[in-house]
Image (cartoon, rainbow, N blue to C red):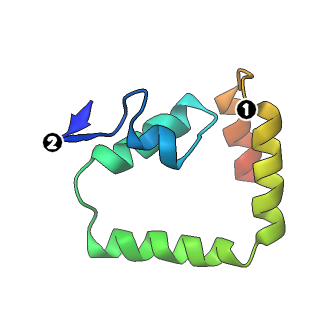
Amino acid sequence: ACAHDLDVVGPNGLLSRIATPITARGQRALADLLLGPRPTAAVVRERQAAVRELTGERALREDLAALSATLRGHKLDEARLARWASHA
């Protein structure tokens, strides 16, 4: 699919260049963010606050990146992952 003249979700699109979600849900969520309507200022501020919160969590980010690398190519149980994340 293209957003006007920009290839966003194709095999060589923007999505494949900027992120590598490991779940189908994550891929859909990122595609929706890129192709969806422009967020409100309040939503942008909420997202910026979430990024600021994670900025100081270097060890967590590194752990998640390492885990992501080990899971690449494996089928994930997204419901189980969501349950785990809600209790972490």
Q: Name the residue: 64% across, 35% down.
A: 22
Give the distance between the C-alpha atoms of the residues marked 2 and 1, in whole angstroms: 37 Å
Q: Name the residue: 33% across, 39% down.
A: 8
Q: Name the residue: 45% across, 45% down.
A: 30
Q: Left or right: where does residue 5 sit relative to residue 83?
A: left
Secondary structure beneath label 2: loop
Residue 84 lies in quadrant: top right
Disc 2 residue type (three-letter): His
**Where residue 10 appears, x then y in whole percent?**
37, 29
Q: Nearer the viewer, residue 71 or 11?
A: 11
**Where residue 21 appears, x then y in whole percent?**
59, 40
Disc 1 residue type (three-letter): Arg
Label 2 neighbourhood size at 10 Å, few (<14), some (14-19), many (20+)? Answer: few
Residue 74 lies in quadrant: top right
Circle count: 2
Q: Which circle marks residue 80 in the picture? A: 1
Up the image or down, 30 lies above or below 40; here it is above
Up the image or down, 60 lies above or below 66; here it is below
Which residue has dot 2 on it?
4
Q: Name the residue: 76% across, 72% down.
A: 57
Which of the two discs, 2 and 1, labels the residue nearer the N terminus?
2
Residue 13 lies in quadrant: top left
